[in-house]
Amino acid sequence: MGAYLLRRVAQIIPTLLILSFLIFGLQQLMPGDPALILAGEERGDPLVLQQIREELRLDRPIPEQYLHWLGNVLTGDFGWSWRIRMPVSQLILEKLPVTAQLATMAFIIGVMIGVPAGILSATHRDRPTDWVANGIALFGISTPNFWLGIMMILLFSVELGWLPPSGYVPLWEDPAQSLATTIMPAFVLGTGVASVLMRHTRAAMLTALSQDYVRTARAKGLAEKVVIGKHALRNALIPVVTLGTIEFGRLLAGAVLTEQIFTIPGFGKLIVDAVFNRDYPVVQGVVLATALIFVMLSLIADLLYMAINPRLRTA
Amino acid sequence: MSATAATAERGESPARRAARRFFRHRLAVFGLIVVTIFVLAALLAPWIAPYDPIATSWARIRRPPSELHWLGTDENGRDVLSRLIWGARASLMAGVISVLGAVLIGVPIGLVAGLAGGWVDAAISRVADAMLSVPFLILAIALAAFLGPALENAMIAIAVTASPVFVRLARGMALDAKATDWFEASRALGNPPWRAAAVHVLPNIVPPLLVQATLAIAEAIIAEASLSFLGLGQQPPSPSWGSMLNSAQRFLDNAPWLAVAPGVAIFLVVLAFNLVGDGLRDALDPRADRR
């Protein structure tokens, strides 16, 4: 296990290196001169432009720019925002807890709906329960998150007036109000997770239910509840747990549009605002941070897989 | 083996058998019909749209659905149905062209990786892994943001972001083919690797590619709508479903119909592509046991 762990961690390094290269490369795609954008009103002044170029090292060769940028990133310096004079890393750390709260709530909603629905669907295969669950999952996969969000605002805020349509209150300031402002976006995000988890739980349960040990358990005369709960479910949940970890990472991407619609000042809104303001260092920083989180989550997924699958423990 | 025997017995080509299996699948046929309707609407937009999609009318701002305007009018007095029909062009074009781009980028690179092996394979696979480790939409937004807001740039961003999936698929198929006897025999006869690949890998790759591409179109349409919603896709005043939803959001209190129609259109077309993709998978995979 120790050797595997080392090998798995070593695998991350080339991935991160390539990612750093790609993300740095993004700024080479930019049309026009960054110095002109940054100079704003003073773009006619060659002295100002020169100063900006020197400050950002735009006058140096690209490989040198890359190495300098990489060196900074490795020490936690993601550069400075062009619009809000603040370090990008500080902006990210400020916004991350908001999105983390949203993602956690969405994940809980997704698991609470998706896993039981998948189990029911598998144990009632080809019966109405199965069709309904599959239909809802297909609906969840095909509905754009942001539209579902708009429809929920229309129903629960505009028509019924039950929930605030936008805004955010931190959890530690006013827990009730915080939940009221995040429940709709969390539900919107959670439906996507629920659909994916439902489909995978169903497939994994069907595979487990067709195994010999399940037949043996039934032949022994065990109650169906025990067969499903103790024998089939435990094995079926192994791939579902790993998948759940990856889905948690994907919630970060889903949060981009959802936060925009519900005006929640999180990670997703940060990248969208940065895109609108042409604040390129922030865009780069957010992509880099997302990639880091995602790579870490895949590592955790693999480790969890090993921890809960006894067959892999000795490997 | 039994599949080959069955084919010989019925005297039916694999393509025909797949078609028969596909048309037996009711939901997939429904999906195909919906896709066809949207494609026809997009192609025939200039003739079937009741009004000019960008003609503004200050006398008819935010009118609810009526006999004159079936889906109402928007904040500039433009007919929503006409914009929806023209918007189908942007969405379908973005979906199909960007996936075509992803296939054209991904498949050759994947084949090279699988056939060449060694450090070439290692390098290509690592890059694909790295790209897959950033969530699809975040990478697409970042690419589109740096390329600049335009429908073409959104399509490029989606194509590039979706390509690693096809790299993986083609690489896997090339590796499978390389391990077969007929591939080795073909090489032993003196055929260069590209020829052996063209004869033995490409025909095998078509069925899974078709399935993957159909499902990818569904994802690309949502991605285009998301980018347009953020102002990174189709630019105003040209209609696109995503940007229609974006402006609709400001008038939820007094013109809720503006937010309903474009969303239903996106939902229907994405659902239809997903159904067709699922149907194709069942029809083309001889081992599929229709779970």
Image (tube, helix red, strand yellow):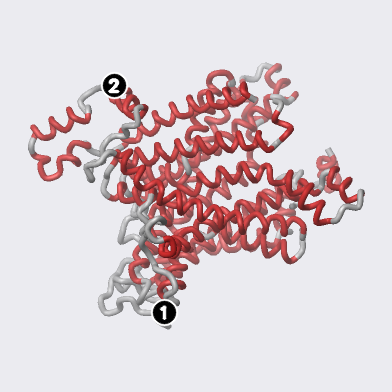
Q: Which of B290 and B152 is in front in this view?
A: B290
Mark 2 belongs to which amino acid? Glu
Instruction: Using the image, name the chain to which the residue with label 1 belongs.
Output: B
Q: Residue at coordinates 40% horizontally, 55% vertically from top-left?
A: A172
Q: Residue at coordinates 63% horizontally, 27% vertically from top-left?
A: B197
Eyeballing the image, is B28 above or below A165? above
Q: Residue at coordinates 41% horizontally, 43% vertically from top-left?
A: B157
What x and y, as percent, mark residue A219? 92, 49
Helix, strand or loop at label 2? It is helix
Q: Nearer the viewer, residue B223 or A229?
A: A229
Disc 1 marks which residue? Answer: B65
Q: Do marks 2 and 1 share a chain?
A: no
When asked about the image quadrant of residue B185, the answer is top right
What x and y, as percent, mark residue A252? 46, 47
Which mark is nearer the camera, 2 or 1? 2
Helix, strand or loop at label 1? It is loop
Label 1 Cα crowd, 10 Å radius (few <14 / some 14-19 / many 20+) = some
Q: Is residue B45 visible to the viewer in this orientation of the structure?
A: no
Disc 2 marks which residue? Answer: A64
Left or right: residue A156 versus residue A220 is left
Mark 1 belongs to which amino acid? Pro
Q: Is residue A155 visible to the viewer in this orientation of the structure?
A: yes
Location of the N terminus of chain A (image quadrant): top right
Location of the C terminus of chain A (image quadrant): top right
Eyeballing the image, is A264 above or below B284? below
Q: Residue at coordinates 31% horizontally, 74% vertically from top-left?
A: B77
Eyeballing the image, is A15 above or below B36? above
Label 2 Cα crowd, 10 Å radius (few <14 / some 14-19 / many 20+) = few
What x and y, as percent, mark residue A165? 39, 67
In the rendered image, the residue lying farthest to the bottom is: B67
What x and y, as percent, mark residue A245? 57, 43
Q: Distance between the residues labelled 2 and 1?
A: 60 Å
